[in-house]
Every structure is written in structure tokens, then in C-alpha cells.
Image (cartoon, grey):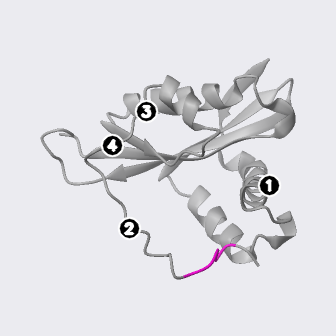
Amino acid sequence: MITVEKAGKERLSDVLAIRREMLAMVNNVPESGISDEIMSISEEYFSTDQHTTVLAFCDGKLAGCATICWITVMPTYSHPTGKRAHIMNVYTRSEFRRMGAARKMVEFLLAEARARGVTYVSLDATESGRPLYEALGFRGSEESMGLNLNRTLTKPYIK
């Protein structure tokens, strides 16, 4: 049985540990290859109120994590509150995949976004995550474009 809970400051060590694991897996490097700098900046970020992070558990064992970052922009006609959000780092440990953990975490975060009056939620999807996000209603956007200002650096979070 999968359960999801909001990760408070008392769970910071769990959040950082699973984030390091996720970054290593996504970037195909050992966990020791994730720089202390990215982990230190992550720790600072997780100590703010600019996000909500959740942890998934299966029979008491840590199964995954996901974060939604809260963003405020100037209001527009389509998004009159100016409240937006971006979901990141949806990750489920391999032994708990295909059990609904990612879906439950994202649904939890979307409910939180609705409760906060958010009018637009974005995310970056991997190929494996795309079917879940599409099933939850996410679609590509014609109104958005992006520019990666970090493209000259090669993986600054890896040693």
C-alpha cells in the first residue's frame, strides 16, 4: 500500500538522500559523483517555503519523492492570480515502480496547487513519465518557449 506525506523539515535527511539517488540515476553516475555544491544548494532550497515536497512510502519504506515549486508572476488574462507552479524530480525507487506511487505524489501536489489558487502547472517529462502526466491532463503548450541559459556548462552538479 502506497501512502504519501508532505515532507517537513524533520524529513530533510530523507529528501536529500533520495534526491542524491535520483540525480545519480538520471545522470547515470554513482551517488558519490553528485557534487556537494548541488546538495548544499538543495538543502538551502528545501529549507524555504518556495516548494512542497512529498515522500511516498510502501509499507513504511521510502519509495519515492516529488516536489512542486511555487512561482508568482505578473497576472495575465489567462492566469489572473499570477500563481503558477512547476513539478520536478518525480522519482520512484525501482522496486516500487508500477505501484502507483508517482501518480499519488503528483495528485497530492496538484491538489495542493488547486488549494493555493495556482492557475498553471508545468513540468519537464521524461519519456517514461509522459504517459502518466498525459493521463493526469498535462499537454504540450503552444504558449511557452524556453531558453536554457546553463547550456554552456556541462552538468555542474556532477563531480
Q: Looking at the image, which residue sits at the far left?
A: 77
Looking at numbered disc 2 in the image, what kind of residue is underneath it?
Leu
Q: State the residue at coordinates (57%, 30%).
A: 131
Considering the numbered disc 1 on the image, is that residue within a helix, a strand or a loop?
helix
**Quadrant of the snapshot with the N terminus:** top right
Mark found first going from the N terminus, 1 or 4: 1
55 relative to 106 in the view: left or right:
right
User: Which mark is on residue 138?
Assistant: 3
Instruction: Tell me whether circle 3 and circle 1 mark residues in contact (CB < 8 Å).
Output: no
Q: Residues within 10 Å of mark 3 (few under 14, many from 20)?
A: some
Whole-percent x and y of residue 77? 12, 40
Residue for badge 1:
21
Mark 3 and mark 1 lie on one chain; the one further toward the N terminus is 1
CA separation in Å, label 4 and label 3? 9 Å
- Evaluate if marks 4 and 2 touch, with contact meaning CB atoms under 8 Å apart: no
Q: Amino acid at mark 4?
A: Ser
Q: Is residue 47 visible?
A: no
Residue under label 2, please give it.
147
Q: Tell me the SS state at disc 3.
A: loop
Quarter location, residue 140? top left
Going by the image, does 73 lie left or right of 54?
Answer: left
Residue at which label 4 appears:
141
Question: From mark 4 to mark 2, how far is it between C-alphas?
Answer: 15 Å
The span picked out in magenta is 153-157
